[in-house]
Image (spheres, grey):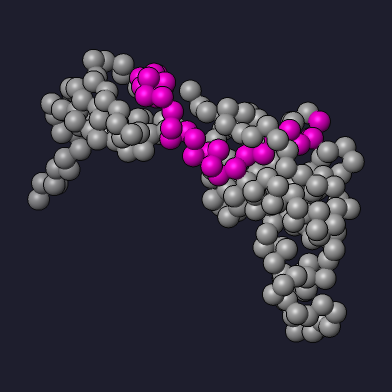
Amino acid sequence: MSIEVKDVMGRVAIAVSADASFADIVAAMKRYAVGAVTVIDADRRPMGVVSEDDLLLKEIDPVRHSVSMFESRRQRREHEKAAAVTASQLMTSPAITVTPRTSVRDAALLMHAKRIKQLPVIDPVTGRVVGTLHQRDVLRVFTRPAAELEADIRAALSDPGPFSIEIDAGVVTIGGRVQRRSQAIALTEAVRAVEGVVDVVCEVVSGNDDLIVVPPLM
């Protein structure tokens, strides 16, 4: 069973309006202990995101008005953010979002690829913000009850044969017997793909090693 964003997300939409002031954004981050807030329009649809990095430019960038013709596009944008005073001026747009039915694995991949720590969760029909997914929410899959994890592991096995499964702090030890070594490897990978599995110790015994490469006859 694939774990979805709706199973772990926070139900509070941590957001500010487009005209929110610099001080309002800082206050929202402090109140919810987060490193970013979603900027929403009048219909609660995401417009962009303001992160702590965006706010820090106010402190570290002394250049507020002068612009050099040799500056890169990124440098010019940083100068603009350093001079900004409202959420719409500070935000990075468009906002990267997920829906409640997005798999947690896909959300984690998105966070890793984009180097972000939280994602606005939107209703796929209205586009409105309905919650927030944090990295710590994603990590909750590794604290699943052992019985629940074992049920998903057995459901993931194409061959539900008499395999023993032991779980200790997310590390799964699987034992039993199969005909071919390739089957043991396939079982290991199937277990490893289950969300919440930290590692797999395969003690499955195989009768034949069908992965041996036989050198060609000369």
Seen in the picture, residue 216 relative to 53 is either above or below; the reply is above
**41 on left or right of 154:** right
At x 14%, y 42%, the residue is: 214
At x 68%, y 45%, the residue is: 32
Of residue 153 and residue 12, the one placed in the foreground of this image is: 12
Residue 102: image quadrant is top right
**Is residue 182 covered in magenta?**
no
Which secondary structure type mostly characterizes the magenta part of the structure?
helix
Residue 199 is at least partly visible in this image: yes
**116 on left or right of 177:** right
**77 on left or right of 141:** right
How far across and down, in percent of the image, does residue 117 sit? 59, 50
At x 16%, y 40%, the residue is: 212
Residue 198: image quadrant is top left
Residue 153 is at least partly visible in this image: no
Of residue 32 and residue 106, the one placed in the foreground of this image is: 32
At x 41%, y 24%, the residue is: 145
How far across and down, in percent of the image, does residue 26 sit? 74, 56
State the extent of the magenta-drawn residues as a range.
126-155
Q: How many marks?
A: 0
How far across and down, in percent of the image, does residue 79 sit? 78, 73
How far across and down, in percent of the image, does residue 167 sit? 30, 28
Seen in the picture, residue 155 relative to 172 is either above or below; the reply is above
